[in-house]
Image (cartoon, rainbow, N blue to C red):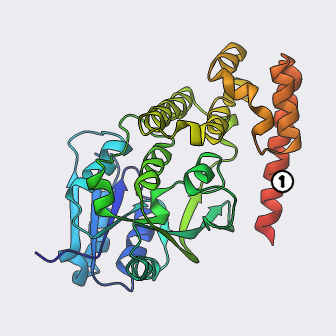
Amino acid sequence: MNIPKVSVIVLIYKVEKYIERCARSLFCQTMQDIEYVFVNDCTPDCSIQILQSVIDEYPQRKSDIKIISHEKNMGSGVARNTGLEVADGEYIIYCDGDDWVDPDMYEKLYIKAREDNADIVMCDYYEEKQGKRIRCSQNPFRHKGNIVEQMLVGKLHSSVCGALVRRSLYEDNHIQFPVGISMWEDLCTSVRLHCFAHRVSYVEEAFYHYVIYMNSVSHHTTMKQLEDMIGACVLIESFLKEQGLYSLYHIPFLRRCFYAKKAFLVNKNLRNFNLWRELWPESNRCLKEFQIRFYHRMGYYLANWEYYRLAVGVLKFSDKMDDCILSLIGKR
């Protein structure tokens, strides 16, 4: 059996408006030896029909395509694991059905992987937000601290869509995506992958176009999303302790927990000052260790001192300032 160089796994669920653009970007790749695995997570719309019509336009790709269908909606974690189970490629990468990629993405990442004998190859990506395009660096060697630390504190994006990963890294270490969690499931998985990886490489080019549909997560978070973020933190904490790595990463991990529970302060529908204080209370005591902006730090100190209403106002102002800065960057 011929093993494809790369398997691209795409989740299909309610992406009928975007799947044509995504699929065309995949089938137009300069790399020929690619396997495409589409996982239909029981999508209720016309995504699959649209995908099939695009496939018909690329007959040379048909033999490289697998479409796996769930009988009922299982969630992104199960769908990603399904794709992983059937993928045969030497390397694995994911693509979300509402995003798209540049034509040479997988060829360049694979060439770098083979040149460096890398377990993981990272690259930059674009954020596509309200008609603006922002290039985001994923250079893991630019910042202080190793890759896991940078992911935990948010300096590096943890998405598996922008990282080519050796399939054996998943298999040999029994790494799967968490089930029942739809927020930060990539972070849970990427932390595991990078803890076990022997060599990570980087291509200083942006290929992936990541579509952003909403502003600040903490202000618009639902209870389910908040529960998922907290659940992801619990899973990461358990893994780090099992591997004897918690002492190495406890400050960046607590920084992540601090962000997860922020919604208990700033989201008026979820506001619960007691839960903010009681969840990972050690994170509140480590505030001086966190690298955060001045106004954010001021807001959290006010919350620690139980000046909650004033803290909420300062944090909301801080988030608006951050949005303004990002908007200005996008106009350059």
Q: Is residue 220 above or below residue 25?
A: above
Q: Which residue is mark 1?
A: 324
Residue 270 percent location from the top left of the image: 65, 22
Q: How many marks?
A: 1
Q: Is residue 135 left or right of residue 236?
A: right
Considering only vertical position in the picture, is 184 above or below 196?
Answer: above
**Residue in view at x 39 percent, y 61 percent:** 94
The one nearer the camera, 259 or 54, is: 259
Residue 71 x %, y %? 20, 42
Report the front residue among 96 and 302: 302
Work out which quarter of the rendered image holds the N terminus and state it: bottom left
Q: Judge whether 236 appears above or below 126 on screen.
A: above
Q: Is residue 251 left or right of residue 72?
A: right
Q: Position of residue 123 (x, y in %)?
A: 54, 70
Quadrant of the rendering where the C terminus is positioned: bottom right
Position of 250 with respect to 103 (left or right) is: right
Q: Residue at x 19, y 74 (%)?
A: 3
Would you say residue 270 is visible in this rendering? no
Residue lying furthest top:
274
- 14 or 225: nearer the eye? 225
Residue 221: which quarter of the image?
Answer: top right
Residue at the image position 59 percent from the left and 56 percent from the top: 146
Query: Label 1 sits on what residue type?
Result: Cys
Percent of width and height locating residue 116 = 43, 78
Identity of the residue drawn at 76% across and 38% down: 289
Residue count near mark 1 (Cα–Cα under 10 Å), binned few <14, some 14–19, many ≥20: few
Residue 149 in sight here:
yes
- Above or below residue 108? Residue 276 is above
Give whichever of 79, 113 is nearer the camera: 113
Secondary structure found at label 1: helix
